[in-house]
Amino acid sequence: MRPDSIVFGAAGFIGRSLVAELLRRGHVVAAAVRTGGDALTSWLTGQDVPLDGLTVVGADITRPDLGLAAADLTAVRDVYNCAGRYAFGLTVAEARAANVTGALNVLDWAASLADLRRLVHVSGYRVSGPEGDPPDYRLGAYEASKKEGDTALRARARERGVPLTLANPATAIGPGQYVGLAALVSDLWHGRLPAVPGGPEVFVPVVDVGYLAAFLAGLPAHEESRGAAYWILDDRTPVLPELIGLLAEHMGVRAPRRTIPVGLLRRLPRALTGADPETLTFLSPDRYDTALARALAERSGLRPPPVEATLRTWADDLVATRFGATPAPRRPYGYQRVAGTSTWVAGNRAEPGHVLLHGLPLDSDSWEPVIDRLGSPVLTADLPGLGRSAPGNGPVDAWLADLLSPVRTRPVLVAHSLACGPALRYAAAHPDRLSRLVLVSPAFLQAPAPRPLRSRLAAPLLRRMSAPRLARTLGVPDGPAVRAAVAGLARRGQARRVIAALRASHATRHELRRTLERVSVPVEIVVGSADPLTVPVNEPVTTIDGAGHHPHLTHPGELARLLAREEAAL
């Protein structure tokens, strides 16, 4: 089959979503990429997109011939240009090569197609304007080059008789979007956003990437879109201070109460503000005429999803991937309200076979090596005030009871170290809700943490600890779990909460030993040979040879086999 559509920049955030949409609609698509062809096909496969109609071709839009590989593209009718450079800090030459010269090269190539129906060029919502309005490269090469490319493209299309449609989307958001507004969300989550940049009416619109891809895919079929330009954005996007407030509430972090005028930001040193000067032009109260796009969407039966839900889901994706540093988990994830606390929850909250609770100073992702080997539904969550969860509004026991309230199974409750306390108390209070309790390295039955580590003075040292040093301190390999812990400890107040939780758990050691004696749920204790119990118990104890306090990180296979054996015995 010969491709009827080609997408330049197909490996990019918008481009890959467009390729997916076209393939789902039954088109035969040539995905033109400079690099990243394997990553594109892998992503499409992960989205359950059929690949029968896909051809990946190499391309470089900065070359006059586009550097297209030897592929039969003579049947192409629709050309989509999602390529370009979306980055700040580019030189003028770098920006113009992709966003001006590259755009014109794509147009010239499209003009050579015998059956060309449409060239759809993806620009930006702050780009299109009165022709002849000269771009100002002093304000930044990215936006200036996009404006210059927009004007040059219109003129060349008229000159060559190319049926051109300009798409001017706002910031497209969805899984995998880590630039632009994402940096502001990162600063908010990490506690590095003392004030909202710009004034109270600043409008930074967004658009759901799936809706955008559907809109773009349908443009060539509408004759009235020829020669038109569409501002594709969600008019319901809250003004920036309200947008930040919405995400802050969702993620359980403090929203800044003040705004800083753009004029002041321009005068302050970048080292102080952390703001790239090029981003400041986007901090504007300007609104955009979306009437044409909304009318076309309505005729096409397209409706954007609720913008508040889209923003919250995007925030979950950003946090899940540590803002692009790690792959997203394969299980459902996101912030949920648990006992009034914004809690990071992952997995199956209704029918888990295992519920896994983490210890200090880790988060629930520390269980991933075990989960990968279990092969049964699991539920995990970051404890209140730890990992990605907000500080709790009440006792952790009430939080755990609410976390497990939707569970319809009788799971195996597995807790590590500090979490053994609340897990044990839950088992004592709700014996009918669990099939078994597994305590991994229960701190209340082992040697106490060194007194200096329980000192309030330890918090600043913990906050500044590097991943290699923390790995050595914990006696585990330096891997994703350790790096996640370091990222969490760097957040405002988290190192202090870790030390406070350590002190509180030390104070309940004797109480928990008494609770263990009266719990009626079957209990299994697992320890490492290098971190044995210091208190005799009546419950069965399994020792993992060579392990220390964190066997789920050092010996995940052995622990997973033990847990699977326990489940099979039920």
Image (tube, rainbow, N blue to C red):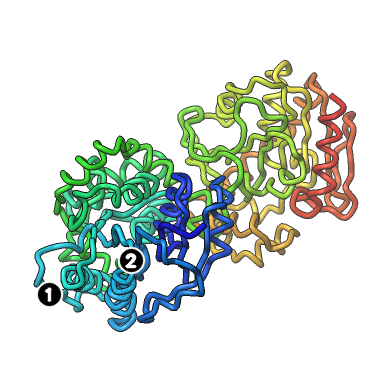
Look at the image and tell me in which quarter the C terminus lies: top right
Q: Is residue 539 left or right of residue 180?
A: right
- 1 or 2: tag closer to the N-terminus: 2
Q: Mark 1: which secondary structure?
A: loop
Q: Is residue 38 above or below residue 513?
A: below
Relative to 162, 81 lies left or right: right
Q: Are marks 1 and 2 in contact (CB under 8 Å)?
A: no
Q: Quadrant of residue 126?
A: bottom left
The quarter holding residue 327 reads bottom right
Q: Which residue is mark 1?
A: 134
Task: Tell which residue pokes out farthest to the front in this image.
Answer: 114
Q: Position of residue 105 (x, y in %)?
A: 32, 76
| 210 to the left or right of 143 | right
Q: Position of residue 247 (x, y in %)?
A: 36, 43
Q: Residues within 10 Å of mark 2 (few under 14, many from 20)?
A: few
- Within-10-Å neighbours for mark 1: few <14, some 14–19, many 20+: few
Residue at 42% in and 46% down: 314
Tag 1: residue type? Pro
Point 67% across, 44% down: residue: 359
CA distance separating discs 1 and 2: 34 Å
Name the mark on residue 28.
Answer: none
Residue at 39 percent across and 56 percent down: it is 14
Q: Nearer the viewer, residue 232 or 520?
A: 232
Residue 284 visible here: yes
Mark 1, mark 2: which one is toward the viewer?
Answer: 2
Please tell me how many numbered marks the rendered image carries. Answer: 2
What residue appears at the point 82 percent right and 28 percent down from the top-left corner? 523
Q: Residue furthest top?
A: 432
- Give the labeled residue for mark 2: 114
Q: Is residue 458 visible?
A: no
Which type of secondary structure does the marked residue at label 2 adopt? loop
Task: Please indicate whether residue 18 sits to the left or right of residue 324 in the image.
Answer: left
